[in-house]
Image (cartoon, rainbow, N blue to C red):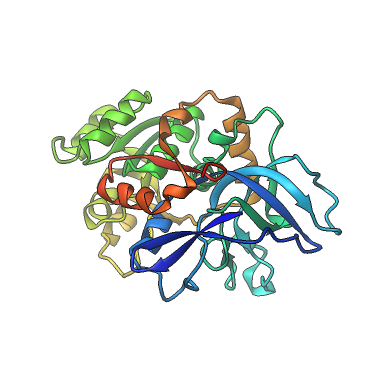
Amino acid sequence: MKATLYEGNKVLSLIDKEVEEPKADEVRIKVAYAGVCGTDMHIYHGMMDKRVDIPLTIGHEMSGTIDAIGEKVTDYKVGDKVVVRPLDDRLAKPSDKGFNHICEELKFIGIDSPGAMQQYWNVPAFTLHKLPETTDLKLAALVEPLSVATHDVRMSELQPGEFAVVLGGGPIGMLIALVAKEMGANVIISEVNESRITKAKEMGLEAVSPVETDLVSYVREKTDGRLADVVFEVAGVQPTLDIMTEIAGIRGRIVMVAIHGQPKPVNLFKFFWKELKLIGARVYEEEDYERSIQLINENNLPFSEMITDVQSLSEIQKIFESIDENPNGMKTLIDCQSI
């Protein structure tokens, strides 16, 4: 089989590797598609070299079919279409209060252990979610990032008819907007990149540039002065932290989706004055995956528009270089069986 390796210094290689038999509690997946996400790009840029065990096969967004089953696995069979929820929570403790998806000792498969950017991938069976037989495996490769979005929206307690503003129109921001709109909310994306604004509009979403539009006035006008019920901070930059408390209305909820590695200034007076809530949202839970699988199979949302490109596994180095050179794209998929 062929597998890819991140070797550090922005180098990804393609290697020959023996196909391994799954352990008793594992399955072997014939990987159909693997998506490249922002975390993979952070790894490529060397930002996670202290965490990643180099060399490593990375990747955690994927779809595929079961190729072999360990002797203790009873819930799946060869040929089943599946996706992997790449969270290894086997070291969860009582102090984690049952929230194993964010447990203190959580290991992320594809970052802390080998991932999906290879032709065959052995994973613990407890990470699997079975897909309906009719599922399009190309679209199913979006289940992982879509589950981030379904989790974020669920954590926000967004209700039909409420007004939501998504600060940041990258892949996750776009998916959050789609999920929020699908459940009956009024949604605006705030994004500075003109190509992403165009893409959002092509997907039936309302999007504006805060550089060209006074976002507070715009939201105030759209809501008859009520401002936003929910704000999703997805961009992870200081200007979005500054504006999130301005566009949130009385008792609004702000969902922190972006990862801020360092402390940042936030206008806490606005939390007092308007009785705002700040909600952290990290990865996903089982129910978020099941909801995402349902949305993918209903296919009422323009998920195919999220896929910018599909490339062969053998082009792994060029794929990452191309994404680096073209940050305007949404989602690049790797065809793991194409060499």
Is residue 206 among the parts visible in the rendering?
no
Q: Decide: is 252 above or below 12.
A: above
Q: Looking at the image, how many numbered discs can be counted on the residues?
A: 0
| Most foreground residue, 302 or 69 | 69
Q: Decide: is 249 above or below 59.
A: above
User: In the image as oriented, which residue stretches furthest toward the bottom?
Assistant: 50
Q: Position of residue 170 (x, y in %)?
A: 34, 43
Q: In which quadrant is the N terminus drawn? A: bottom right
User: In the image as oriented, which residue stretches furthest toward the left?
Assistant: 212
Question: In screen coordinates, is 253 left or right of 197?
Answer: right
Report the residue at 19% width, 35% height from top: 217
Q: Position of residue 275 (x, y in %)?
A: 37, 52
Q: Position of residue 179 (x, y in %)?
A: 48, 34
Is residue 327 among the parts visible in the rendering?
yes
Question: In screen coordinates, is 24 left or right of 321?
Answer: right
Tell me the quarter of the picture where residue 147 sits.
top right
Tell me the quarter of the picture where residue 307 sits.
top left
Question: In screen coordinates, is 203 left or right of 91?
Answer: left
| Most foreground residue, 262 or 218 | 262
Q: Position of residue 198 (x, y in %)?
A: 26, 29
Report the residue at 57% width, 72% height from top: 104
